[in-house]
Image (cartoon, grey):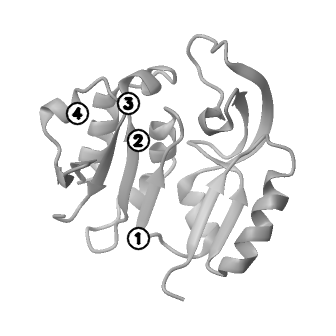
Amino acid sequence: MLARILASSASAQPNAWALAATYIAKLGNLIINECALTDKSGSVKFSVRNGFATSSIAQTGPTDPKIKQTIQVPAITLDEYVLKCGMSPHFIKIDVEGAEAKVLRGGENLLSLPPDSAPVICLEYSSSNYARFGFTTAQVRDLLALKGYSLFALDSRGTHPAAESDLNSTDIINIVASKKRL
């Protein structure tokens, strides 16, 4: 086994987990946990939108007319998740439709690890998505910078140090955060 992949996701699609389990069993190195990662453990409201790919924990901003229903799902912090699994990830991909800061805040201990142990993080970076949860891109940048992370843009050219134009873009982009030079 080259890697053990742990995934955490909430879903409101009927039988989504049973369907996923059928395919996952064939992989052997993927474990899916039916929960949301956020800044507090317990349960959270999860907004199901038209098009499941954009569903997320319930936003704190104005109501989205595309929300079909809101359900309660189990929630855990990234730090508690890592303790529960008994392993520290080397790479984390976060794409939670604007709640990225909540996931990062729930991983304060993990993000505080020294450079040789800290995970590389790839996250969706979007001022409009963050605003739905009361966050700004500057707050996400500051949170990562305080933990010693440098930011790199990930685009069709590959990975390169994030320029101000990347960080101030109104587009949805992917950012890689690392304590090591990429």
Question: Is 111 located above or below residue 43 in the figure?
Answer: below
Name the residue tied to disc 4: 167
Residue assigned mark 1: 90
Q: Amino acid at mark 2?
A: Glu
The amino acid type of the residue labelled 1 equals His
Q: Which residue is mark 3?
A: 126
Distance Cα–Cα, label 2 vs label 4:
12 Å
User: What number is the disc on residue 171?
Assistant: none
* In-front residue for pair 8/103: 8
> From the viewer's perspective, is 71 left or right of 167?
right
Q: Secondary structure at mark 2?
A: strand
Q: Is residue 162 above or below residue 92?
A: above
Cα–Cα span, label 1 and label 2: 18 Å
Task: Give me the residue at 51% from left, 45% from top.
Answer: 103
Q: Mark 1 and mark 3: span between their CA atoms?
A: 24 Å
Binning the other alpha carbons within 10 Å of mark 4 as few (below 14), some (14 to 19) or many (20 upward) gives many
What is the distance, in whole Å, between disc 3 and disc 4 at their CAs? 9 Å
**Amino acid at the residue labelled 4:** Leu
Left-right relation of 142 to 67 = left
Label 3: which secondary element: loop
Q: Answer with mark 2 or mark 4, whichever residue precedes in sequence.
A: 2
Image marks 1 and 3: residues in contact by CB distance under 8 Å: no
Residue 27 rendering spot, x and y as whole percentages = 65, 78
Q: Amino acid at mark 3?
A: Ser
- Image location of residue 160, percent across then percent down: 16, 52
Q: Sequence order check: which comes first, mark 3 or mark 4?
A: 3
Q: Quadrant of the C terminus?
A: bottom left
Q: Which mark is residue 124?
A: 2
C-alpha distance separating marks 1 and 4: 24 Å
